[in-house]
Amino acid sequence: MKKRTLVRTTLAMAAGAALAMTVQRFYPQLVTPTATQSDSAPSEPQPLYWVAPMDPNFRRDQPGLSPMGMELVPVYPDDAASNSAGSVNISAQLANQLALTQQPVKRAPWRDERLFAAEVLPHPQATQAVQVRFSGWVESLSVNAAGEGVSEGQPLLSIYSPELVTAQQELLSARGAMLKGARERLRALGMSSEWIQNVRRAGKIQQQVAITAPQAGLLLDMPLALGQQIRPGQTLLRITDPSRVWLQVQVAGQALAADLSQAELQVRSASGDWQTTELHSLAPLANQQGRQRIQASIAGEHGLMPGDWVEARWVSESEPVLQIPAQALIDDGMQARAVVRLADDTFKSVAVVAGRRSHKAVEVLQGLSANDVVVTSAQFLIDSESMIDSDLLRYAKPDHSGMNHSNMDHSNMDHSNMDHSNMDHSNMDHSNMDHSNMDHSNMDHSNMDHSNMDHSGMDHSGMDLSNMDHSNMDHSNMDHSNMDHSNMDHSNMDHSGMDHSGMDHSNMDHSNMDHSNMDHSNMDHSNMDHSNMDHSNMNHAAQPAKDQGAKHDSAHH
């Protein structure tokens, strides 16, 4: 009993397995596979390639190192459903490796900062000239060169003046009212009351007069030499106070703001710090169109010397404008661009129109808005990748599947130079095309399949078919009943492989056809009606006797 039950169970299981296999084979749509955990779990995206962080053109199909020794970073496929053309996905890991930084586009007062070269000049109010009011000759010099520092009252040079010697003699010999006149004459020559009193007290004429420094400072120039003759009113030396200097900047090109209250000029001191100057004037240069001159002064410990050229910075503020950091702008001379963040990990290079520029910011006239975020570092890699993607989409093969060419007029198009050898015409409908004016003489139809083409409406009368090889063509499905073969030369055509059993020759005129070279031995004429055929001009003498006997036997029967 148990053995019989076991046999039944085994047979039932075998029948069930066979039924399941049958259903799965012939009715697969009824079988729903069970999703496994591995099938249902989303697969992690695989990198398209690995790229060098500093060179987007260096790509490899596996991880490794770049020529600079940096680890290659993976580039994953873009999500075509969500990303626009030219967008680039940058994962958080890749952004960290690229040291990618971002800053928002902001609208703020435009701070115009431009760098110039400023010339340091002596301050007019801190400079004194050394002059004398008498003529003479330089006897000695106590200073040697320009830039030499002097203190107030320090002797600079000595002069021998005959005019001054004569005035001293009058002073020493004068009495009473004439003494007063002698003193006035010496004062007119520029001598001090103390010096006059010393000469009177000593009672001795000074042959050389010492010229002292009127103030402490630096010698601006040294135009004197020993023995040089001097004249009254001549500037012998100039001494300036270096703590107060004058700055002059000449600006070419775009004019600066004329409102000095909204601007300032800063200069870099000898210590490297920027110091603000006191602006005095901003005016155009005479007879020099497009050029301006800035004049300013600075006092204090700045270390600047007259004759130096220093770095100056012009700073002014205007109305609020849309601006981005200067390092965010990519300008190749053809098109200014900036890399914008579209999402958390999606970036795109966009064209912008830049306005004013400084070393810190760039004014944006078009292309960005105040809510955008731009990349300020590593943007060149993203820009090149974005441009490559945009170019690939731009030059991709267009899809014409949805285009309707039925209304296009091709009548004036010259197709004579077009190579159609590699084109697939199998799905094209030529039924409505007019081929009457087309020259097919140079076309090679040997590889074309004409079996499914309908030639019933085509006029072949003007076509030269003499060079066409019909040996491999299948005419079994072609209807020749309406075709005029009267002008066709069949003498060189090989019909041995053609099956004429189903062809109706009742309406064909064979009177002008030369069958002398045709082999009729394999042709079955038993079903052909020869009663209306004129054989009077046919030469049957060349036919074998057995064939003639067979024909006579057939006639007798």
Image (cartoon, grey):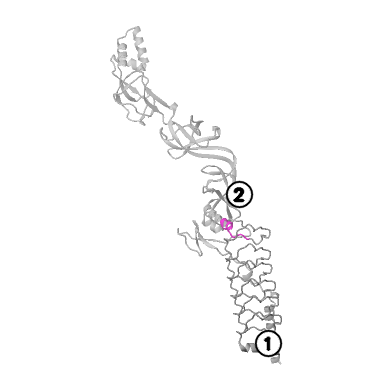
* Residue 397 on the magenta span: yes
Magenta residues (range):
390-399
Determine the residue positioned at 68% across, 87% down: 10
Name the residue carrying label 2. 372
User: In the visual, does 548 lie left or right of 222?
Assistant: right
The quadrant of the picture occupied by the C terminus is bottom right
| Whether label 1 touches label 2, CB < 8 Å | no
Residue 513 on image: x %, y %: 63, 76
Name the residue carrying label 1. 10
Q: Quadrant of residue 540?
A: bottom right
C-alpha gap between disc 1 and disc 2: 73 Å
Residue at the top extreme?
176
Say which of 551 and 313 sits in front. 551
Three-letter code for the amino acid on which mark 1 is drawn: Thr
In the displayed structure, 316 sits above or below 374; it is: above
In the displayed structure, 409 sits above or below 106; it is: below
Residue 45 on image: x %, y %: 58, 64
Question: In front: mark 1 or mark 2?
Answer: 2
User: In the visual, does 139 lie left or right of 297?
Assistant: left
Q: What is the crowding at mark 1: few (fewer than 14 residues within 10 Å), some, or many (at least 20)?
A: few
Say which of 299 and 106 sits in front. 106
Q: Quadrant of residue 243?
A: top left
Q: What is the crowding at mark 2: few (fewer than 14 residues within 10 Å), some, or many (at least 20)?
A: some
Three-letter code for the amino acid on which mark 2 is drawn: Asp
